[in-house]
Amino acid sequence: MAALTPELRDLQAEIQGYADEYGLDTFTTIFELVDYRQMCEIASYGGFPVRYPHWRFGMEYDHMLKSHTYGLSKIYELVINTDPCYAYLLEGNSWVDQKLVMSHVLGHCDFFKNNAFFGHTDRRMIDVMANNAARVRRYMDRHGVSPVESFIDTCLALDNLIDPWAPLREPTRASAPAPTSASAGKGKGAGEGELDEVEVGRLPSVRGYLESYINPPELLAAERARAKAAEEAQRRKIPRAPERDVLGFLIQHAPLELWEADVLGIIREEAYYFLPQMQTKIMNEGWASYWHSKLMTTRALRDDEVIDYADACAGVMATAPGRLNPYKIGIELFRDIEDRYNRGRFGKEYEECDSLAEKASWDRKLGLGRQKIFEVRRLYNDVTFLDEFFTEDFCREHNFFTFRENRRSGRLEIEGREFAKIKGKLLGQLTNFGQPFIYVIDANYLNRGELLLGHRHEGTDLRLDYARETLRALERIWRRPVSILTVVDERPKRLRFDGSEVSVSDESAAFRL
Amino acid sequence: MISRIDQDHSRFREIVRGKVRQNLRKYMSRGDIIAPQGKGTVKIPMPQITIPRFTFGEKGGGGVGQGEGEPGDPVDGKEGQQSGKGKAGQGEGDKGLDVEVSLEELAEILGEELGLPRIEPRGVDSLETRKDRYVGLRSTGPESLRSFKATYKRALRRQIAMGTYDPARPVIVPIREDRRYRSWRTDPRPHSNAVIIYMMDVSGSMGDEQKEIVRIESFWIDTWLRSQYKGIESRYIIHDATARLVEREVFFRTRESGGTMISSAYRLCNELIDNEYNPELWNIYAFHFSDGDNWSVDDTSNCISLLRAELFPKVNQFGYGQVESPYGSGQFIKDLRAAFGKEEVLVTSEIKGRDEIMDSIRDFLRRGR
């Protein structure tokens, strides 16, 4: 790894100047020059120089190095969300490519710093990762490489079971479920009394003297007792309400060794750190591409570089049918927003305008575009971004379609160009970044200390062979049988792993919140 | 210092090895991995290496794309593939993984798993090849080996020492004593040569499935023996009523019909050895695969006498693999066993189906001859 050459350093200063001019607000960005092996190494570590030892990084590396060697793919650039922001340039990239990459990186950097969903991430993650790595190494020295590594495998099987919204409401969650229930009990000293007051179903009695006949006191008392017992049971239940942060729940409640809890905590911490990047893939790439295009075409590009730039840029923006390129959708959406807000093509008046001709030439010369896209990059994530700005006009203009498998030929075929369907599918793919919703329902299922999870079924089944294996991983951590409620082929089912085999049983109802 | 990624990488290779070892029987019964991929590696499909998670199964069959086209037009490529540029590292692909393993590694795994002994080549010490290497300089030699660079340096040094060197007019004139010639050394190299002679019955009763089994067997035998000898040769003989020496491709593709005279193959094999492979100098391995159906009892007795008199004294090992086929009687292996009993050189193995390939390979190779 090397620092930049003087020429590249000057180039960086030049491009940073253009970015500042446009109002991009970046962390200090440090570029390092690496060869392609180092690039593959850093890329397989998710952009970080030091991670805990694990074979999966080696697998990624193997894969990337091979596809690089065979010329199948090339990692131009890599940037991580830290302060200062580190980015890596590939040694031997052409001058235009380096310019392009620097502009692109500054776009990412601005996004990291200003997007709300990155707000909670730790900007000193390099140090955190290095510390985590040191701890894992120490555990490996003490307990052996294989046990620790296979425990990491176990944890990784669960690393998508986190609550994407937890970081945003962390302050109220600081008092985690268990303490809350205790303090609630103590705080409301009169809780018992209150429960007595519980209103139970009473039949209306018009005449007072019939009251004790229509609503016999002993019946009321029995009802109250039942309501109280139910309330009590609910209060004792762990978790009190279905919990999405399965990893956090396991750290608190599973019978783990200290080192195991720590490793699980490390996996959880890193999962939360990478979360916003998955939540904002389209926006992040779109924003960076928007800015590399803007900076290059209006400032940085020299005449003799135009062709090379156009070539590189076309490669990045290429779309193939049946494949969504986040760079492409993202940049086009940002441009579309800018254009619409420049011309005032939004709001009630525009929406309700019936004349196509008038709509087509609609221009209020508001000039709000730039301001709007900066606002969008601050406040939105992929789901809200597409939900709000993926309009029917945009969809038509950019030739979107839905496709599905033709069961007879086994090929994927274009299904149609219906806007509602396209948008529905897009949002469906992005919701929860394409992961199923899984909750912890009960930690004492059937009063046998078994763990019960629930899959909130939204129309797509779980992949069953993976689900079975994941249950094994859960059992390894919980050390008691674990079950998950899900839906298979439209029938509610429960998968249960009891330590020796996975069984599937019918359930009366699917899990809902 | 070993970099961190190399540690993780070797850890990954270790896991791959472990998986291959675990599932060796399964891999050995499949034909599709044995096609070598270019430079001495094979591709092994390995779906179990991904980390399982709760994920969606079939994505409701489809997605969203961008581009021209009418409803019903085919969509190329699969959705979700990454374009060339981008941040990598998050989110492992859930595609099944093809892992490349080198043939040497595969042989090692095979050896470990089957507990195969290393082969002690015979007659090694007596056999040497010599190789000349240019290693140094000397002051005499033929002009064709004169080293211009060294000669020039000597001359320059001499002229400077004598004070006749003129930087303004740097002409160097070598004299007789300046001349240097390259010299060589002859290295003796212990060397062992080995040849594998495969023979296969291609008569009408050998079906495609039987040939596939032979193909897989010969791949693994090849892999193992190649790891034991440098510079190994393979020769292929096919026979029905007559025998022919053929190329590798022909060996596996031919389908003839007609009767079977096993002795024809043995006779040809014997001639081949006599003509090209001196048993004193070569380690000779012969493998014969058939469905055990021979034309006549006479021919079988011919075979037995040929084996006893000619082939057995010449080869390290003679392997006979009998592939079960619905048409064959499977008599030949019984005849061989009856005739030779505990003969060391002969190994017989019955292969009932693909699952038994591994056991058969073990039978063939465990003697370490």
Image (cartoon, coloured by chain):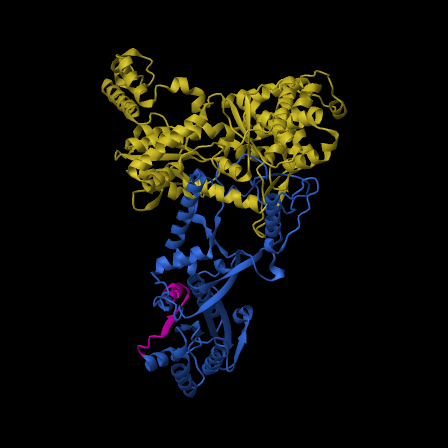
Chain colours: A yellow, B blue
Closer-to-camera residue (A135/A191): A135
- The location of residue A164, given as percent across then percent down, is 45, 27
Tell me residue A252's x, y (percent): 31, 27
Number of callouts in the render? 0
Q: Where does the image place residue B66, in percent across and percent down from the top left?
A: 64, 38
Quadrant where the N terminus of chain B sits is: top left
Q: Which residues are magenta?
A: B341-361
Residue B253: image location, x then y, percent: 54, 70
Q: Is residue A187 left or right of residue A344?
A: left
A243 up-or-down from A315: above or below: above
Q: Is residue A193 visible?
A: yes
**Closer to the camera, A25 or A126?**
A126
Is B342 magenta? The answer is yes
> Would you place residue B351 above or below residue A187 in this image?
below
Left/right placement of residue A264 relative to residue B173 reads: left
Along the viewing direction, whichever of A406 and B285 lies nearer the viewer: B285
**Viewer-proximal residue among A424 and B232:** B232
Q: Could you tell whether B240 is left or right of A106 in the image? A: left
Instruction: Give the image quarter of residue B309.
Output: bottom left
Is residue A381 one of those drawn in magenta?
Answer: no
Q: Is residue A420 visible?
A: no
> Quadrant of the image for the C terminus of chain B?
bottom left
Kindly identify the residue that appears in the image at 32 percent across and 46 percent down: A501
Name, please, the residue furthest toward the bottom: B298
